[in-house]
C-alpha cells in the first residue's frame, strides 16, 4: 500500500521537500511520457479525434435532464465496457468503469457529470459544421463525458497498467437541484480507498479549479391561519412578517473579504388581494469563500425571520386572532474546501501542463470537486479541451480545435496521480 504512494510521488515529484520547480515538473511529465505504453496511449488520442467528436455528438443527443440520467449512463457504461473495464451502476445512478491497478486497495477517480440543466423535451439534436458543433449540453458536459470514454479507450488500447486502480465515473446530479448527489454518494461510499479525484467539466485547458466555493440554498416559510382582509383584520399576516424579516436580513453586514454574497431569488405566497394569506416564502442563495461566513449568514437569516414574526405579532396586533409559525429549510449545500499547494495531484497537473506546453490559472468555483475537497481528499476540476460557450443555453456550442491538448493533459494528470506500474519481465 505504501509502495503505491511512493511510486506516485516519485513519478511526479522528484523533490518532496519543496514545491517542484518548473524544470523538475517538466522532467516528471517527460518521464511519464517516456513510458512506451503511455506514449502509445497519447498517440491513440492523436489518431482518434474523429471518433471522440462522433462519440461526443452521439452522447449529447441522449437527453439527460436532472434526475433522468439513466439512458445516457447506460450508453457511457457500454462504451466503458467496450474498453475492457468492469462496469457497474451504483444505487444513485453513477456509472462506474473500473480499470484495475496493481494496487487495488487504493483508487483514484476520473469523473464527468452526465446531467444537463435542460428539461425533458428539449431539442438536443447536434448541428455539426466540421470541428464545430451546436446543441444544448454539447460542451457542458458532452466534452467531459467524451473525454472520459476516450481516455479509458486510449489506456486500454495501449495496455497501460496503473499502480493505483482508476475508476472512470459518469456521475449524476452535478447541476442545480442535483446538489452534487452523485459525487456525494461516490465519495461517501469509497472514502477510505479514495486518494484523488479529477473532474472533467466542459471545455478548455486554461484553468484548474483547486478551491471550492461554498454555497447554501435556503427556503424560509411563514405560516398563519389566513382569513378575510376586512373581517379578519388584525390577524397576523405571513407576507407582512416575511417582508419585515427580509428587510432585516438584507441589512446584514457582509465582509469586503472573504467574498460573500446573498440573493433572495424567489418570493411567493398569498391567495388573493382580499385575503390574509396563510403562507409566504422566499428562496435564498448564499455563497462565500469562507465556511464560517456562510454559517453566519444562515444564522442571520433564521434570526431575521424569527424577528420578522415577532415584529408582526407585536401590539397593537390582536393576539386572539391566531399566531404565526416559521421554518427555514436547507434546499441544498455545497461545502467549501481547498487543495493544498504542495499536493501530489496539483504537481501531477502541473507536470502534465509543462509536458504539453500549457499554462493554466488556478480558480475558485462550485463543481463536483467541492465534495472531495471538503473532506480533505485531493481533487481538481478541469476542462477537457477545445473551446466552448453558451453553457446552460440553447445556443451552446463547442469547437474541437486543439482538443488533443486537453485530452492529453487529463490523461497525464490521472496517470501522474495513479502512478504507472513497472513493466514486468515476460
Ligand atoms: Zn458542467
Image (spheres, rainbow, N blue to C red):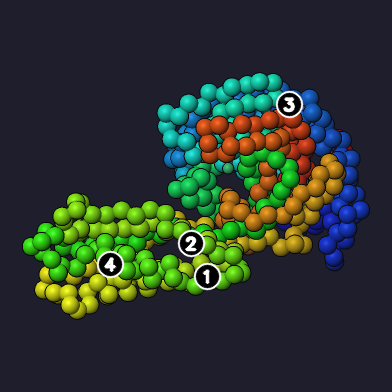
Say above or below: 128 vs 261. Answer: above
Q: Position of residue 70 (x, y in %)?
A: 47, 34
Q: Which mark is residue 241?
A: 4
Q: CA distance from mark 3 to mark 2?
A: 43 Å
Q: Position of residue 419 (x, y in %)?
A: 78, 48
Q: Which of the two discs, 2 and 4, labels the residue nearer the N terminus?
A: 4
Does the CB distance between marks 3 and 2 fall below 8 Å?
no
Q: Which mark is residue 49?
A: 3
Residue projecting furthest to the left: 231
Q: Looking at this view, is 198 or 381 the one in front?
A: 381
Residue at the image position 58 percent from the left and 37 percent from the top: 390
Where disc 2 sits, the SS reads: strand
Q: Which of the two discs, 4 and 3, labels the residue nearer the N terminus?
A: 3
Q: Position of residue 28 (x, y in %)?
A: 87, 50
Q: Which residue is mark 2?
A: 262
Q: Which residue is mark 1?
A: 254
Where disc 3 sits, the SS reads: helix
In the figure, is residue 112 to the left or right of 179?
Answer: right
Residue at the image position 86 percent from the left and 52 percent from the top: 25
Where disc 1 sits, the SS reads: loop
Q: Position of residue 59 (x, y in %)?
A: 57, 28
In the figure, is residue 364 to the left or right of 12?
Answer: left
Name the quadrant where ligand 1 sits.
Answer: top right
Say above or below: 7 vs 314. Answer: above
Amino acid at each position: 500500500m505504501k509502495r503505491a504512494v511512493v511510486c506516485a510521488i516519485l513519478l511526479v515529484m522528484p523533490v518532496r521537500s519543496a514545491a517542484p520547480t518548473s524544470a523538475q515538473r517538466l522532467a516528471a511529465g517527460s518521464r511519464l511520457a517516456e513510458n512506451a505504453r503511455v506514449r502509445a496511449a497519447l498517440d491513440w488520442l492523436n489518431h482518434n479525434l474523429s471518433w471522440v467528436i462522433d462519440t461526443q455528438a452521439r452522447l449529447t443527443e441522449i437527453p439527460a435532464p436532472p434526475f433522468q440520467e439513466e439512458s445516457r449512463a447506460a450508453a457511457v457504461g457500454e462504451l466503458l465496457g467496450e474498453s475492457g473495464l468492469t462496469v457497474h451502476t451504483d444505487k444513485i445512478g453513477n456509472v462506474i468503469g473500473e480499470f484495475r491497478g496493481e494496487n487495488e486497495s487504493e483508487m483514484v477517480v476520473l469523473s464527468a457529470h452526465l446531467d444537463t440543466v435542460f428539461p425533458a423535451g428539449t431539442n438536443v439534436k447536434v448541428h455539426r459544421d466540421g470541428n464545430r458543433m451546436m446543441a444544448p449540453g454539447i460542451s457542458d458536459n458532452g466534452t467531459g463525458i467524451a473525454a472520459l470514454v476516450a481516455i479509458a479507450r486510449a489506456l486500454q488500447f495501449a495496455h497501460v497498467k496503473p499502480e493505483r486502480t482508476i475508476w472512470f465515473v459518469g456521475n449524476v446530479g452535478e447541476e442545480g437541484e442535483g446538489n452534487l448527489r452523485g459525487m456525494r454518494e461516490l465519495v461517501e461510499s469509497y472514502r477510505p480507498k479514495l486518494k484523488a479525484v479529477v473532474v472533467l467539466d466542459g471545455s478548455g485547458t486554461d484553468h484548474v479549479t483547486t478551491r471550492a466555493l461554498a454555497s447554501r440554498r435556503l427556503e424560509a416559510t411563514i405560516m398563519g391561519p389566513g382569513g378575510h382582509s376586512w373581517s379578519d383584520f388584525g390577524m397576523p399576516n405571513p407576507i407582512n412578517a416575511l417582508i419585515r424579516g427580509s428587510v432585516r436580513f438584507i441589512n446584514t453586514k457582509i465582509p469586503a473579504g472573504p467574498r460573500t454574497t446573498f440573493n433572495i431569488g424567489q418570493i411567493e405566497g398569498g391567495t388573493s388581494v382580499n385575503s390574509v394569506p396563510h403562507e409566504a416564502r422566499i428562496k435564498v442563495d448564499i455563497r462565500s469563500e469562507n465556511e464560517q461566513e456562510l454559517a453566519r449568514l444562515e444564522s442571520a437569516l433564521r434570526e431575521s425571520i424569527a424577528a420578522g414574526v415577532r415584529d408582526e405579532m407585536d401590539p397593537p396586533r390582536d393576539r386572539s386572532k391566531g399566531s404565526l409559525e416559521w421554518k427555514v429549510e436547507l434546499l441544498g449545500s455545497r461545502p467549501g474546501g481547498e487543495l493544498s499547494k504542495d499536493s501530489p495531484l496539483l504537481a501531477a497537473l502541473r507536470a502534465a501542463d509543462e509536458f504539453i506546453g500549457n499554462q493554466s490559472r488556478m480558480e475558485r468555483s462550485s463543481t463536483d470537486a467541492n465534495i472531495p475537497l471538503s473532506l480533505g481528499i485531493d481533487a481538481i476540476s478541469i476542462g477537457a479541451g477545445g473551446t466552448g460557450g453558451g453553457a446552460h443555453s440553447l445556443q451552446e456550442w463547442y469547437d474541437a480545435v486543439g482538443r488533443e491538448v486537453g485530452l492529453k493533459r487529463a490523461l497525464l494528470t490521472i496517470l501522474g496521480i495513479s502512478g504507472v506500474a513497472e513493466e514486468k519481465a515476460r
